Image: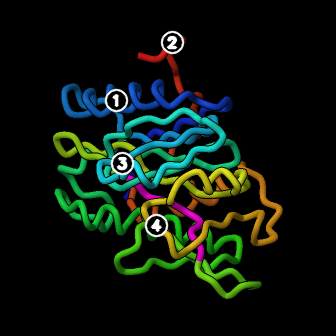
Amino acid sequence: MTKEHILWEISKKTVPYPQALSRMEQIARDIRATGAPERVWLLEHPPLYTAGTSARTEDLFNPAGYPTYPAGRGGQWTYHGPGQRIAYAMLDLQRSHGDVPARDLRAYVQALERWIIAALARFGIKGEVREGRVGVWVQDPASGMEEKIAAIGVRVSRWVSWHGIAINLAPRLEDFDGIVPCGIREFGVTSFRRLGLDTDMAALDQALVECWPSVFGSQPSALQPAELSLTPA
């Protein structure tokens, strides 16, 4: 049986956060109201910090004075910037996706974790999850410490998901010092580059594309340019 296709989009230039937020929200509304295509949107943001619904003001330091935005997703403070692959997933969770049951938010988040871990494995990176800690973690071979390589933040409106994942390919790790990432003080943040892997964004995107069907069941379309308005809403 031919697998259902899902629209995959990409933005080649960094996307301001308000513009991305507005676009995601509109797509989520359209999926529910008009049956618009579900999709995955690949992009990068300029340097910024976003606050989840549990973010605490004392966990923001921001010595560089980067813009900060309320995100509306779950979680705490997150950094986004160039060199970090963002994948926003807008899916109708009222129906199943692969082995992810309908209307099961916990199973959806766990599927995002499995997707990230499968993609990391393509590069020889062993990603793991930890009870009580959001995101995907790896062990630094030099220090032996567990460090975060990918973050997950999800919002669901009328059972349509938006927001998604962020994987650290080669961002400025110093910029994470401007927050307590996801409210976790005991552990650091890492990246492909910090782990000694000279991987480009296109290779990471290909891994994400190839690992998607085994988790979510649908077949990614060829990457399409994302249509963005000239000014953020």
In the picture, measured across the screen, residue 159 lies left or right of residue 99, that is left
Residue count near mark 2 (Cα–Cα under 10 Å), binned few <14, some 14–19, many ≥20: few
Q: Residue at x 63, y 38 (%)?
A: 47
Q: Position of residue 186 (x, y in %)?
A: 52, 76
Q: Is residue 103 one of those drawn in magenta?
A: no
Q: Position of residue 162 (x, y in %)?
A: 35, 42
First of labels 2, 4 by sequence position: 4
User: How far apart are the alpha carbons under marks 3 and 4?
Assistant: 14 Å
Q: Nearer the viewer, mark 4 or mark 1?
A: 4
Residue bearing mark 2:
231
Mark 1: which amino acid?
Ile
Q: Are marks 2 and 3 in contact (CB under 8 Å)?
A: no
Q: Nearer the viewer, mark 2 or mark 3?
A: 3
Q: Nearer the viewer, mark 1 or mark 3?
A: 3
Judge whether residue 96 can be spotted in this image. yes
User: How far apart are the alpha carbons under marks 2 and 3?
Assistant: 24 Å
Dot 1: element: helix
First of labels 3, 4 by sequence position: 3
Q: Are marks 4 and 1 in contact (CB under 8 Å)?
A: no
Q: Is residue 148 one of those drawn in magenta?
A: yes
Dot 2: element: loop
Residue bearing mark 3:
52
Residue bearing mark 1:
27
Residue extending furthest toward the top: 230
First of labels 1, 2 by sequence position: 1
Q: Residue at x 36, y 52 (%)?
A: 56
User: How far apart are the alpha carbons under marks 1 and 3?
Assistant: 20 Å
First of labels 2, 3 by sequence position: 3
Colour treatment of the image? rainbow
